[in-house]
Amino acid sequence: MTAIAVLGNGRVGGSLAAALREAGHEVTVAGREPGAAADAARMARIVINATPGDGSLDRLAALREELRDKILVDVSNATVDGPDGLPAELIHPGSSLAEQLQEALPATYVVKTLNTMLFPVMTAPASLTTAPDAFLSGDDPQAKQTVRDLLVDLGWRQEWITDLGGIETARATEAAILFVPHVIRSSGFVPFAISIAR
């Protein structure tokens, strides 16, 4: 059992929290109440960023001390939305939210994952007809192994998890969000994930 704080209580945060509790972890969910994120992060070993990506950097940079020596699992994408509410462009072109978080939180182990799929797939990867991929980006091998173990608890098979390398590789997975609006407009809001055919 691991103490986990989920920052963000929307569809993504709520579904991750429920699945991790079901897997036996001790999970605290922090919404937007003043001080809630700091209190939750302080008590956790692993913190999951499920806050809207356009404001994640400021929110999390303010928690530098609470996140010291913690693993921060970043599942958000920092985008500017178009008129229909779907992602239209990246906020950090030439970089990534994960890299910006790692720079702002040098004593925290940032690992990017689960950001290349619609949220229902995060906790039910086997529901797709084709095996999906979950990608890991981060600078600390031990932190990535811990996150890999969490993904297994969420139903991800080891062969579906690909370690891309350092935190700079998050640029590629974050850019994949630009597929999402076009797929949704073409096929509707049907769960899908970016996967690599092998």
Image (cartoon, rainbow, N blue to C red):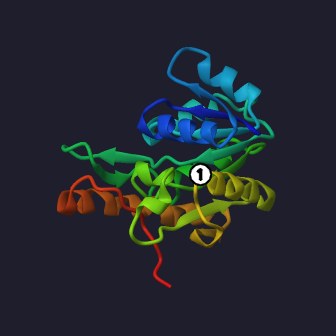
Decide if residue 188 is on the left or right side of residue 102. Answer: left
Q: Position of residue 153 (x, y in %)?
A: 65, 52
* Quadrant hosting residue 48: top right
Relative to the observer, which residue lies in front, 62 or 76? 76
How many numbered marks have been drawn onto this rendered protein structure?
Answer: 1
| Label 1, residues with CA under 10 Å away: few <14, some 14-19, many ≥20 | some
Q: Quadrant of residue 65?
A: top right
Q: Is residue 145 above or below residue 103?
A: below
107 shown above or below 162: above
Foreground residue, 105 or 143? 143
Relative image position of residue 8 (x, y in whole percent): 51, 31
- Report helix, strand or loop for mark 1: loop
* Direction from residue 161 to residue 76 in the image, left or right: left
Q: Would you say 144 lies left or right of 151 here?
A: right
Asked if residue 36 lies left or right of residue 190, the reply is right
At 61% from the left and 39% from the top, the residue drawn is: 22
Q: Quadrant of the N terminus?
A: top right
Name the outermost residue toward the bottom.
198
Residue at 34% from the left image edge and 46% from the top image edge: 80
Q: Is residue 56 above or below residue 190?
A: above
Q: Which residue is mark 1?
A: 154
Q: Amino acid at mark 1?
A: Leu
Question: In the rendering, at what x and y percent does residue 64 appear?
Answer: 71, 32
Give the image quarter of residue 130.
bottom left
Residue at the (59%, 54%) spot, across then down? 112
Q: Position of residue 7 (x, y in %)?
A: 57, 32
Q: Residue furthest top?
A: 34
